[in-house]
Image (cartoon, coloured by chain):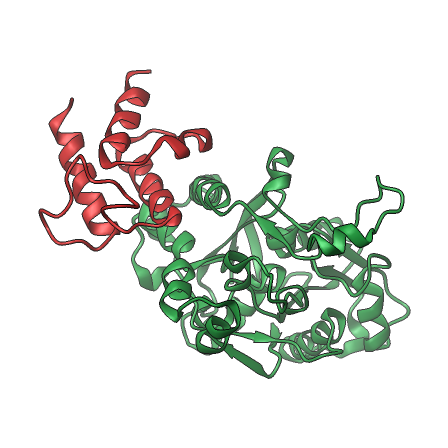
Chain colours: A red, B green
Amino acid sequence: MDKSIENRVIELVTQVLRRKEGEVTLQSRFVEDLEANSLDVVELTCLAEEEFGVRIAEAQLPSIRTVSDVVRVINELRQQ
Amino acid sequence: MGAYLPKRVVTNTELAKFLGVTEEWILERCGIHERRYAADGEGPAAMASEAVRLAVADAGWKLGEIDFIIFATLSPEHFFPGSGVYLQNILGLSHIPVMDVRNQCTGFLYGLITADALIASGKYCRIVVVGAEVHSHCLEVPETNKEMAILFGDAAGAVALEVGNSPLILSSSLHADGSGADYLKLELFDSRRRPWVTPEAIKNRKQIPVMEGMRVFLRAVTEMTATCKSVVAAAGKTLEEIDLVIPHQANLRITETVRRRLHLPPEKFFSNIQTRGNTTAASIPLAMVEAQQAGVLKRGQLVLLLAFGSGFTWGGALIRF
């Protein structure tokens, strides 16, 4: 796993969900742990697309449940 | 330019009570504090007529000098005829052609770009493009889709375009992708069925629009961002040269995400959705009027109009205002 992607995704999640520094980890679940709604996840996805130069398909959205899922999707897309 | 707003203000306090949600729930989903609802009996053509009168006066024309009207709405009075003829009748302009545009939130841009081409063709000299919507009629029922009900408002907005006058479209693009048609629609009327309107359809609340919010959000951000970049590049300009972006006021979270992806400062991305809601085809001309009233939109500026909506349809137009 690319640590810089992990750290930047954690920063983005912290910023979008207005959490305190250190509250968000790779294991954080969006709905259960971070009280995010579906639009939060999409907003985050959109910003991650721009940041990492990838295009996340609509069909991939349901598989994004944790912060590490975002990192996984980005890594997969960057390897393609 | 001219705009019309119905008098009734619907705050989040009122709407939250009606929908059984909290005010915070509404605000965090769309950034809207209040919106306007048309009065009973007030339709899009009547609202559009007020906006057209103001736009014509603002342009220094007489009403009878309009030689073509393009009317964009997704909420016509009736299934047919379109709202254009009702508007024409209210205005007493029975000698001119009117054209209805059914491209939802992108309707105004489709109309504007068509008007620009009609003027360039030399066939018409003074065209009014108007967008007007009455959404509230299908939102004010208790079973309303809450995610939809919080978004929409009623309004009308119009611009008057004349040969040789601004706004001049420097570059533009229009798009559609029907594979997204089912993600945001109102399906009460279905001419494939016999009978085409059934008691079951009404019982199943098919008169209320449905939306797959996540899909619409993702696609809207993707396409609005890409269109912004391509339309600006097509005019040989850079994003830094743009004085103001006036996006369709879809949802504050969508437009804010687009702005952040484009790395534009908040002052270059106009927003009035907080008090107007999403007024679909009326949204851009209404925002233009209010941006000018606020002193943000000024003559001579390089302005990008941007829209995305049901269909999916989307587009952009770079104008010298």
Q: Identify the residue at horizontal 70%, vertical 72% (top origin).
A: B48
Residue B221 or residue A20, whichever sits in front: A20
Vertical placement of B67 versus B235: above or below?
below
Q: Identify the residue at horizontal 27%, vertical 30% (top origin).
A: A69
Query: Where does the image place residue B8, in percent across and percent down from the top left?
Result: 58, 82
Vertical placement of B283 versus A51: above or below?
below
Residue A29 lies in quadrant: top left
Question: Most extreme residue toward the bottom, as rendered?
Answer: B7
Left or right relative to A11: residue A32: right
Query: Where does the image place residue B13, in percent across and percent down from the top left?
Result: 44, 77
Question: Most extreme residue toward the top, as rendered?
Answer: A80
Left or right relative to A45: residue B87: right
Instruction: Please identify the quadrant where the C terminus of chain A is shown.
Output: top left
Residue A68 or residue B195, whichever sits in front: B195
Query: Where does the image place residue B47, in percent across and percent down from the top left?
Result: 70, 75
Q: Identify the residue at horizontal 45%, vertical 33% (top origin).
A: A58
Q: Identify the residue at horizontal 70%, vertical 49% (top origin).
A: B117
Query: Where does the image place residue B70, in percent across and percent down from the top left?
Result: 74, 59
Residue B292 or residue B312, whichever sits in front: B312
User: Can residue B119 be seen in this snapshot?
Assistant: no
